[in-house]
Image: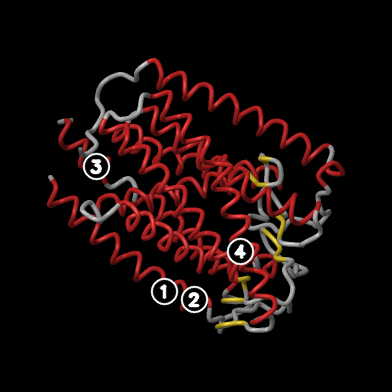
Amino acid sequence: MKSETKKKIVSVFPLIPIIYFLLNLFSMYSLLRPRYPDSKVIWIGIAVTVITTVIAVLYLVRLRRES
Amino acid sequence: MKPTWVDTPAKPWEKQTAVILAGFFSIALVIGTIMHHLYPQILGVPGLAPPRVMPYVSYWTELIVGDVTSLIIAGIAFYHCRKKYGLGMAALFFFGSMIFAGLEENEWILLSGRVLGNKTYFFTRGGLWFLEIPFYTCLGWYFISYCSFEIFEVIGARWPRIFRAMSAGIFAMLLDFFCDPLLVNIGAIMNPPLPYGMWVWQNENTLRLFSIPMMNFVGWALLVFLFTYLFGFILDKKMSGAYSPGKMIAVFFLAFPVMLLICYVSLNSMENVFQNVWGHVNIFPVDFPVK
């Protein structure tokens, strides 16, 4: 693999732990949901995910401009 | 000067730094784990039954899966850091962040909570322990703080260092808005349900957000801000050639006691204000009453 391609792949690595973290939290929520279907915690999760997505897109755009 | 991607082999000082820090942290983990599991009376470990999220496997398997998964995810962040900033800086961030956050949390749990009697919080489950902090929590703190740091290093490449560190702190706090209300109530899924989760907040009559003490969120932002600012400062000195490796490591670790003191004094003062002024306020409560 070309070193430039490898660099591009490794550049997105900082997003992987954040995505894992949010997925893990949503899986925890799925365990709580059957007993607490009306819990407001899901709205916090959605708000956090939307803001994180915007930041992730900004990060990717900036990476693209740099390369 | 911008950091370059490192394709050259690690220098001797980088290898030595990584080995010494790994050795020190491993010894601390072994001692902490033995004390927590075999001699819980020394640290005054509360005897609460730990909540389970994978009841179909044994308790120890669940703990191993938790630690190993966190280690793999932290490994991804470490690999990126090693490639972009070199082995020495990657080792400083990896072990430095876990030692800094671990000491700060132990300060709250052991010093403030168990020695001085100002109850704060404690963890209910974990395989490997850094005194009273589970290893997976240290790893989680590492990868969240590193990813927050790196994301704003790229997005805010032209911003002053302090704004990048502040943004990283706020972003990490934002992630905790979802994490804390969920995981402190995860015991509610058990049969019979438990009125606590992965950790237990003991602060009484304090300002709360999402039913979690506000001090926790302020603490997250402050810790990540201080640590990423320090690391960025050291990184800038390395890039400009102003600091030798020895001076860089010395400044990095000598700043820890100062930062721990700043955290302790500022958060303690803030908690006193929260308790005295808004002691019964709970903004946007998120509760999971035991059914």
Q: Residue at x 57, y 76 (%)?
A: B209
Q: How is the image coloured?
A: secondary structure
3D distance between C-alphas at marks 1 and 4? 16 Å
Could you tell me which secondary element the residue under label 3 belongs to?
helix
Q: Are marks 2 and 4 on the same chain?
A: no
* 1 and 3 marks in contact (CB < 8 Å): no
3D distance between C-alphas at marks 1 and 2? 6 Å
> Horizontal placement of B169 versus B124: left or right?
left
Q: Position of residue A58 (x, y in %)?
A: 23, 61
> Horizontal placement of A33 versus B112: left or right?
left
**Residue type highlighted by circle 4:** Leu
- From the image, tell me which residue sits under label 3: A9
Q: Which of the chains bears the disc numbered 1?
A: A
**Residue type highlighted by circle 3:** Ile
3D distance between C-alphas at marks 4 and 3? 32 Å
Q: Which mark is residue B183?
A: 4
Could you tell me which secondary element the residue under label 4 belongs to?
helix
Could you tell me which secondary element the residue under label 2 belongs to?
helix
- From the image, tell me which residue sits under label 2: A42
3D distance between C-alphas at marks 2 and 4? 13 Å
Could you tell me which secondary element the residue under label 1 belongs to?
helix
